[in-house]
Image (tube, rainbow, N blue to C red):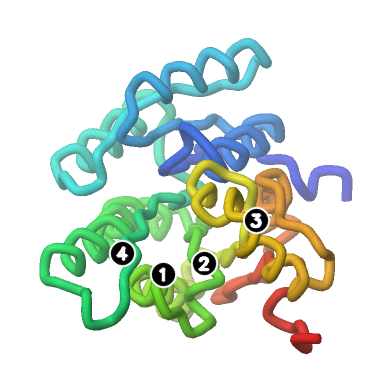
Amino acid sequence: MKDLFDLSGKVALIMGSSSGMGKAIAHILGLNGAKVIISSNDKTACEKVLAEFQAENINAIAIPCDVSQKEQIDFLVSETEKTFGNIDILVNCVGIAIAGSFLEIDAESFEKTMQINLQSAIYLTKKVIPKMQAKKDGAIIYLSSLSSVRGNKFLGLYGISKAGLAQLARNLAVEFGPDNIRVNAISPGVIDTEFAKPMTTNPEVMAKRVALTPLRRIGKVEEVAGVTLLLASKAGGFITGQNIIIDGGTTISDGN
C-alpha cells in the first residue's frame, strides 16, 4: 500500500507545465519520484520552473515547445528519450480559449483552436504510444474542461475542442487497454489560474458561479494535481476511459 503513489523511475512529460495547473501537476509528479519534463511555448517560464524544481531536488529538465509546430513536438520527444528514456506518463495541459458566439466562429479561430487544443494532442500521443505499447505500460491524461460536458454560449468552440479530448481518451482507452495503457481526461471547473482570470476577476460573474457551486468556492491547482497523481500512479491502476470532473459540484447543483 505504501507505494501506491510512488512514481520512482517513471518519466513524465507534462505539456503546458510552466504555469497554472500544468506546473502544479509537474510539481506533484516530481515530488513523488517521477523524472519530469517541463514544457510550454514560454522558454523563460520553463527555465524559471526548472530552477524552482531543482531547488527541491526534483529530477527535471525543461524543453520549450510550440505545439502548433510538429517539428518542435518531434524534437521534444526525441530530446526527452535521449535524456530520460521512454515516456511513461504523458499529461497534456495545453489549451487556448477564443470567446465568441456560434455565428462569430471563423475559419482562423476554428483552425487555431483545434490545432492547439486537439490536433497537437493527437500528434504527440501518436509519437509516444508505440513505446508504451512495447513495454506494456503507460498512463496518458488529457486536461479537458467543464465546458466539454455543458452547453456554452461564448466558449462553444473551446468546449467542442475539449470534448474532443475527452472522447479521445475513451477511444484510446478501448484500443490500447490490452497493452496496459490507461487513458483518462480531467475536466476542471473554475480553478484559480491566470487562464481563468477573465472570470475570477469579475465579481458579478463569480458571485453567480459560486452560488451555483455546492462547495461555494473555486478550485485550487493542487486539487487538480492530486487527481492527476492518482491517475498516473498505481493508485489509479484500474481507472481508464474516464472524464473526471473537478468542479466543486457545479454540474450537480440544483440551481437554488
Q: Earlier in the sequence, mark 3 or mark 1?
A: 1
Instruction: Judge whether residue 212 can be spotted in this image.
Output: yes
Q: Amino acid at mark 4?
A: Leu
Residue 162: image tag: 1
Q: Earlier in the sequence, mark 2 or mark 4?
A: 4
- Per the image, the residue denoted by label 2 is 145
**Res 81 quadrant in image:** top left
Marks 3, 1: nearer the viewer: 3
* Callout 4: SS: helix
- Per the image, the residue denoted by label 4 is 118
Residue 93 sits above or below residue 27 on the image: below
At 62% across and 38% down in the image, what residue appears?
A: 24
- Per the image, the residue denoted by label 3 is 203
Q: How far apart are labels 3 and 4 at the CA level?
A: 31 Å
Q: How far apart are labels 4 and 1 at the CA level?
A: 7 Å
Q: Earlier in the sequence, mark 2 or mark 1?
A: 2
